Image: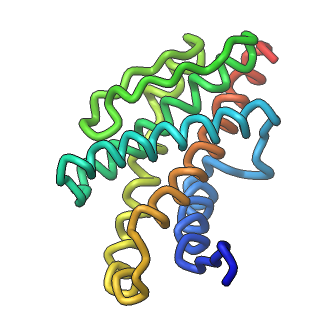
Amino acid sequence: MSEFSRSMTAQAAALVIVNAARRTDVLRGQVATAPALADSEKELFLRMFRHLAERRATGVNELSSDEISSLFTFVFARAAEAVTNMVNGRPDDFSMLGMFDGKVPIYADDRITGAFKLSEWPQNAARAYWEWYEIEADAVARRGIDPVLPLFEALKWMFRISSHLAIEQLEADGRI
């Protein structure tokens, strides 16, 4: 038996985020990225999975809608941080503060931080994901899929699109 699986559900969750970005004009063309950001994404999501596993070990297995919304804001802020670190040649040291409680600090270039504080992208992405999940939740459960799989797939695309926004902000300001 293969160790690999294919999840149309996870792919659908990712597409929800990409479509939300296009619908709200957050994404008008191709996603700007860099190899360093792929490394940042991997590091961030490994930490997030560990943090979630620690939470589950305490017996808390469900995520509320507020906690899911917080995750989108959290990933948005960490993308700003990753782009800042990439541009400044600094290693990532992602804090898990605010992952579930909505009190998410942003450790990023001031120009990115200013633009990100005005952005409605995290709320729009979380809303799009939540609306999709409300329709698909029973199907996810019937298929025996851990609901974290499609959520984290959506969050990966949140990171990628948010990194793109941070790069665009720095380009617009002539920083890169």
Residue at the far front in the pictured view: 1
Q: Nearer the viewer, residue 129 or 11?
A: 11
Position above or below: 55 against 9: above
Which quarter shows the C terminus? top right
Question: Which residue: 50% across, 24% down?
Answer: 94
User: How many marks do you count on the picture?
Assistant: 0
Q: Nearer the viewer, residue 172 or 77?
A: 77
Q: Position of residue 66 (x, y in %)?
A: 24, 49
Query: For residue 43, what is the image quadrant?
Result: top right
Position above or below: 6 against 25: below
Here the colouring is: rainbow
Position above or below: 95 against 143: above
Position above or below: 58 against 164: below
Q: Where is residue 67 in the image (x, y as percent from the top left)?
A: 27, 48
Question: Which residue: 58% across, 27% down?
Answer: 80
Question: Which residue: 72% across, 34% down?
Answer: 37
Which quarter shows the N terminus? bottom right
Residue at the far left in the pictured view: 59
Question: Which residue: 61% across, 71% down?
Answer: 11
Q: Position of residue 154 (x, y in %)?
A: 52, 58
Q: Where is residue 174 in the image (x, y as percent from the top left)?
A: 79, 14
